[in-house]
Image (cartoon, rainbow, N blue to C red):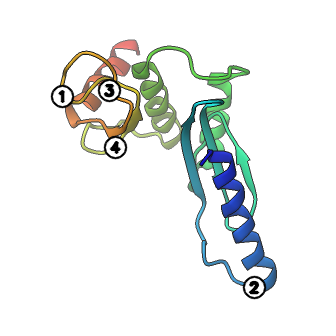
Amino acid sequence: MPCDVLAKRIANISQVYTQRAYMRPLGVATTLISVDSEYGPQLFKCDPAGYYVGYRATASGPKQQEILNHLEKKLKNKEYADGTWEDVVELAITALSTVLSVDFKKGEIEIGIVGGPRADGKEGTQSEFRTLTEDEIDERLQAISEKD
């Protein structure tokens, strides 16, 4: 099922409950991410009121708007972030670090990727979702500190 179709369905269900039943059983902001064979990477966000929208990059939480502003400045009018998966991960860490005014350590954040290197160390890329190990996160943190 394409990501945009699922986002629309979730938003429609949320809106019906909001308008007709006067309750919000799905009282969370939902972020949907997929890699579509026709459209490529897709990112959609649904809110409890039934609104959904597609993004190039997004965030959720108390500092959502500040992170979105930071990412907007960094990405400008680009379709996708430039560079390798390492560069994209470093951009995400830098955005969080800048907005939250925190220097992260490897055990303090979790990062998930699709299409990065294989976890077993063999050649090629992995098409499934996986979380980075603490050592891989530490490598990205070291790369960020070397750039500064």
- Residue placed under numbered mark 4 in the picture: 109
Q: Nearer the viewer, mark 1 or mark 3?
A: 1
Contact between marks 4 and 3 (CB within 8 A): the answer is no
The residue at 34%/20% (across/down) is: 145
Residue type pointed to by label 2: Tyr
Q: CA distance from mark 1 to mark 4?
A: 21 Å
Label 1 packing within 10 angstroms: few (<14), some (14-19), many (20+): few
- Residue placed under numbered mark 1 in the picture: 120
Q: Earlier in the sequence, mark 2 or mark 3?
A: 2
Q: CA distance from mark 4 to mark 2?
A: 37 Å
Residue type pointed to by label 4: Ile
Q: Earlier in the sequence, mark 1 or mark 2?
A: 2
Q: CA distance from mark 4 to mark 3?
A: 11 Å
Numbered circle sitting on residue 142:
none
Label 4 secondary element: loop
Q: Indicate the position of residue 78 as horizontal and vertical percent values.
A: 68, 20
Locate residue 103: give its quadrant.
top left
Q: Nearer the viewer, residue 131 or 96?
A: 131
Label 2 packing within 10 angstroms: few (<14), some (14-19), many (20+): few
Residue type pointed to by label 1: Asp
- Residue placed under numbered mark 2 in the picture: 22
Q: CA distance from mark 2 to mark 3?
A: 46 Å
Numbered circle sitting on residue 141:
3
Q: Indicate the position of residue 64 as horizontal and vertical percent values.
A: 61, 48
Label 3 secondary element: helix
Q: Earlier in the sequence, mark 4 or mark 3?
A: 4
Left or right of 57: which side holds 106? left
Q: Is residue 85 visible?
A: yes
Contact between marks 2 and 3 (CB within 8 A): the answer is no
Q: Earlier in the sequence, mark 4 or mark 2?
A: 2
